[in-house]
């Protein structure tokens, strides 16, 4: 999402990353990955559960991203091995992308199928454009 930040914000949206760990850990993790927008911590992973983001296994965390390889990297997938060993980290927690409107209603939810799986940016833009 970092690469698309300007286009997303031009649509009136605000990017926020939610990462496992405390807010200080999340900020360090995001900085290591080059994320320049706001990063919040969720040490108990409450937001992951609230959005129904599943846990994966070795296949979803290691094998599928390696198979996707260059495609995942081109789409922004990065992982820092050392950073993944934070005290509050669950290696098997899969990510996702949610769009919540100004009234607090969920407008879009993408549940990643593996650690390097990101939604098609055109789908994100379409939802954001429909909210303008």
Image (cartoon, grey):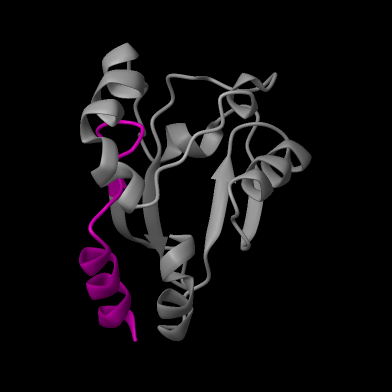
Tell me what residue is drawn at x 22 percent, y 35 percent: 68
Name which residue lies at 72% across and 42% down: 28
Q: Which residues are magenta?
A: 110-132
Compared with residue 76, is residue 81 higher up or lower down, i.e. above or below?
A: above
- Quarter of the image containing the C terminus? bottom left
**What is the x, y in percent for residue 101?**
42, 70
The image quarter containing residue 67 is top left
Which quadrant of the rendered structure holds the N terminus? Answer: bottom left
Query: Which residue is most to the front?
Result: 70
Q: Quadrant of residue 94?
A: top left
Vertical order, 32 against 62 (above or below): below
Name which residue lies at 28% across and 48% down. 110
Q: Is residue 8 left or right of residue 68?
A: right
Q: Residue 106, image x and y in percent? A: 36, 58
In percent of the image, x 54 and y 33: which residue is there? 46
- 37 horizontally vs 121: left or right: right
């Amino acid at each position: 999402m970092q690469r698309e930040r300007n286009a997303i914000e031009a649509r009136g949206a605000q990017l926020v990353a939610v990462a496992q760990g405390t807010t200080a850990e999340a900020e360090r993790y995001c900085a290591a990955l080059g994320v320049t927008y706001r990063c919040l911590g969720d040490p108990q992973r409450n937001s992951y559960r609230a959005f129904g983001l599943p846990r994966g296994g070795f296949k979803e965390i290691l094998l599928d991203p390696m198979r996707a390889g260059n495609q995942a990297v081109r789409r922004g997938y990065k992982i820092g091995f050392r950073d993944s060993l934070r005290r509050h980290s669950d290696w098997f927690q899969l990510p996702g992308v949610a769009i919540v409107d100004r009234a607090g209603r969920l407008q879009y939810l993408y549940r990643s199928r593996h650690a390097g799986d990101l939604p098609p940016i055109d789908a994100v833009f379409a939802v954001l454009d429909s909210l303008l």
